[in-house]
Amino acid sequence: GENVEQHPSTLSVQEGDSAVIKCTYSDSASNYFPWYKQELGKGPQLIIDIRSNVGEKKDQRIAVTLNKTAKHFSLHITETQPEDSAVYFCAATGNQFYFGTGTSLTVIP
Amino acid sequence: GAVVSQHPSWVICKSGTSVKIECRSLDFQATTMFWYRQFPKQSLMLMATSNEGSKATYEQGVEKDKFLINHASLTLSTLTVTSAHPEDSSFYICSADSGALSEQFFGPGTRLTVL
């Protein structure tokens, strides 16, 4: 089956700085890579996703890049704000979702 | 669009009782719903995949007689934790497949505490 690794597990940045979270996957058949933001006590919320036929996607301060050859994809958050503080999960999916282990992001005001 | 609700959001029960959690897709029909369990500071663990009108598919190590799943309609799936014990205390999250190219939308989760 698929194996998704996510790094780092914790990340602290100053407000206004950028944050980057990286994930690797093992199954070359995976073709959909969503990123979720989970706030304490709430369910995951889809923030951005990318499919295997695209290398990069951007939505305002959030961007995702995908390198199919290397089997890794990354989440980039620019101009971070305190409300960006949360746990972020990547996932890789073909027929089933496989989640990364999560990254706890803290944006320091 | 693509809103998934769960009810209840928080439940406390005594050991030995059964608890039912509902998952609803509010503005779309979901032929497939998923049930996850999440322990503190950990990732989501898939418990089972629920298809409308058929039996759920359980992941390895998940007791199907303990975690009963019913997906009777295209907008509702239920998870019943039978004879709950303190070790069943967890955050249970459902998601629904919109059918649009693998996208899943998650519910807000249900916090179960078994005393």
Image (cartoon, coloured by chain):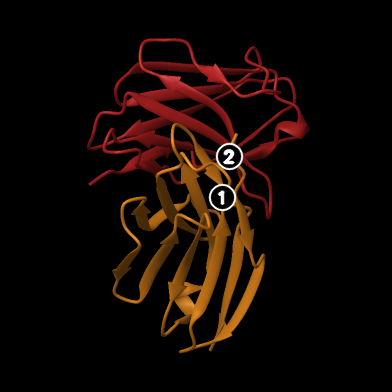
Residue A79 horizontal side relative to residue B38, left or right: left
Residue A94 point in image, percent of width and height: 44, 37
Choose between B78 and A55: the one closer to the eye: A55
Up-down: is A77 above or below A16?
Answer: above
Give the quadrant of the C terminus of chain B. Answer: top right
Residue B61 point in image, percent of width and height: 71, 23
Residue A88 horizontal side relative to residue B31, left or right: right
Up-down: is B101 above or below A50?
Answer: above
Q: Which SS class for mark 1?
A: loop
Residue B46 point in image, percent of width and height: 57, 34
Residue shown at 60%/57% (left/top)? A102
Up-down: is B18 above or below B8?
Answer: above
The red one among the chains is B
Label 2, on which residue?
Answer: A2
The orange one among the chains is A
Check disc 2 and give the amino acid type. Glu
Circle 2 crowding by C-alpha within 10 Å: few under 14, some 14–19, many from 20: some
Place residue A55 in its image quadrant: bottom left
Residue shown at 29%/75% (left/top)? A60
The disc label shown at residue A80, or none: none
The disc label shown at residue A25, or none: 1
Q: Is residue A40 visible?
A: no
Check disc 1 and give the amino acid type. Tyr
* Circle 2/circle 1 CB separation < 8 Å: yes
Give the mark nearest the N terminus, 2 or 1.
Answer: 2
Residue shown at 48%/34% (left/top)? A96
Place residue A10 in its image quadrant: bottom right
Q: Which SS class for mark 2?
A: loop
Residue A81 horizontal side relative to residue B1, left or right: right
Q: Chain of mark 2?
A: A
Q: Chain of mark 1?
A: A
